[in-house]
Image: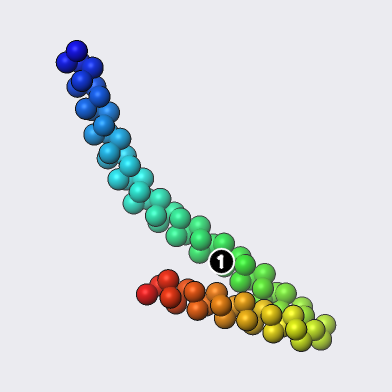
C-alpha cells in the first residue's frame, strides 16, 4: 500500500511541476502564435487596401484603414 501511495504522491508532484512549466511555456507560445496571426491578417489587409487603391475602390481602402486602426487600438490596450 505504501508503494502505491508513494507513486501517487510522486505523480502528483511531477504533474504539478509539468503543469507549471507548460503554463509558463505555453503562454509564450500562445503570445507568439497570436502575434503571427495578427501579422498575417495585417499584411493581407495592407495588400487588399493597396489593391483597392490601385483599382480606385475608395470604400475598400477606407475599410482596410478602419480595420487596421481597430487592430492597432486593441494592440495598445492589450499591451498596457
Residue at 56% from the left image edge and 77% from the top image edge: 70
Residue at 24% from the left image edge and 34% from the top image edge: 13
Rendering coords of residue 32 (x, y %)? 47, 59
**Quarter holding residue 57:** bottom right
Q: Is residue 76 above or below residue 36?
A: below
Q: Residue furthest left?
A: 2
Rendering coords of residue 3 (x, y %)? 20, 15
Rendering coords of residue 17 (x, y %)? 27, 40
Residue 59, can we see it? Answer: yes
**Quarter holding residue 7:** top left
Q: Is residue 63 above or below residue 22?
A: below
Left or right of 31 on screen, residue 63: right
The residue to which callout 1 is attached is 38
Residue at 32% from the left image edge and 45% from the top image edge: 21
Binning the other alpha carbons within 10 Å of mark 1 as few (below 14), some (14 to 19) or many (20 upward) gives some
Rendering coords of residue 26 (x, y %)? 40, 50
Q: Quadrant of the N terminus?
A: top left
Q: Quadrant of the C terminus?
A: bottom left
Dot 1 falls on a residue whose secondary structure is helix
**Image mark count:** 1
Closest to the observer: 48 or 73? 73
Residue 50, can we see it? Answer: no
Query: What kind of colouring is applied to the model shown?
Result: rainbow
Amino acid at each position: 500500500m505504501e508503494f502505491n501511495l508513494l507513486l501517487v504522491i510522486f505523480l502528483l508532484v511531477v504533474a504539478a511541476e509539468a503543469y507549471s512549466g507548460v503554463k509558463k511555456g505555453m503562454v509564450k507560445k500562445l503570445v507568439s502564435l497570436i502575434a503571427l496571426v495578427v501579422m498575417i491578417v495585417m499584411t493581407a489587409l495592407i495588400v487588399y487596401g493597396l489593391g483597392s487603391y490601385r483599382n480606385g475602390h475608395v470604400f475598400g481602402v477606407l475599410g482596410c484603414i478602419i480595420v487596421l486602426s481597430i487592430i492597432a487600438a486593441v494592440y495598445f490596450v492589450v499591451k498596457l
